């Protein structure tokens, strides 16, 4: 298994465990996962694993990504997600230039990991 895939899966599992401690069993947390892209087989495998985790752990989740791996489009997706106010955000930033966008989530006290 690719090292990057292992890291993403570990992040997702840790996030899922944290969600379990934060939310009551009756509540379904809203989790949004923003990936770099979905046009390659690697990221399609990541999406499939994340969606399987959503089903297995009864999480209301969504996986989104910009088409053709565009940093600008990923920033636009992050702005949209900021307005939706999910309980947890997991991001695989396209470029380090996307990090300032993530700082807006920090200012609004969102939980996120990248």
Image: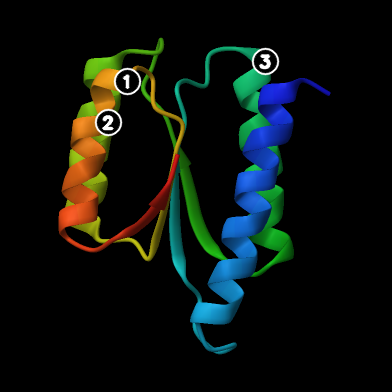
Q: Is residue 85 rendered to the left or right of residue 94?
A: left
Disc 2 on helix, strand or loop?
helix
Classify the position of the N terminus by image quarter: top right
Tell me if I can see residue 45 in this picture.
Answer: no
Q: Do the residues labelled 2 and 1 touch (CB within 8 Å)?
A: yes
Question: Rounded to the nearest whole Å, what is the CA distance between mark 1 and mark 3?
Answer: 23 Å
Answer few, some or many: residues within 10 Å of disc 3's Cα (few below 14, many 20 plus, some between 14 and 19).
few
Name the residue tied to disc 3. 41
List x then y, in percent, for residue 98.
26, 26
Name the residue tied to disc 1. 96
Classify the position of the C terminus by image quarter: top left
Q: Residue at x 29, y 16 (%)?
A: 71
Question: Rounded to the nearest whole Å, what is the CA distance between mark 2 and mark 3?
Answer: 25 Å
Answer few, some or many: residues within 10 Å of disc 1's Cα (few below 14, many 20 plus, some between 14 and 19).
few
* Closer to the eye: label 1 or 3: 1
Specify the label residue 99 is tagged with. Answer: 2
Q: With respect to residue 40, does 14 lie above or below?
A: below
Of callouts 2 and 3, the N-terminal one: 3
């Amino acid at each position: 298994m690719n090292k990057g895939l292992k890291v993403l899966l570990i992040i997702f599992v840790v996030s899922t465990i944290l969600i379990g401690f934060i939310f009551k069993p009756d509540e379904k947390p809203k989790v949004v996962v923003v990936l770099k892209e979905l046009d390659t087989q690697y990221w399609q495998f990541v999406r499939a694993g994340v969606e399987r985790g959503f089903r297995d752990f009864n999480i209301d989740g969504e996986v989104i990504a910009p088409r053709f791996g565009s940093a600008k489009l990923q920033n636009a997706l992050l702005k949209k997600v900021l307005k939706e106010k999910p309980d947890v955000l997991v991001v695989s930033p396209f470029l380090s230039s996307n990090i300032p966008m993530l700082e807006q989530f920090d200012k609004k006290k969102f939980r996120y990991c990248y």
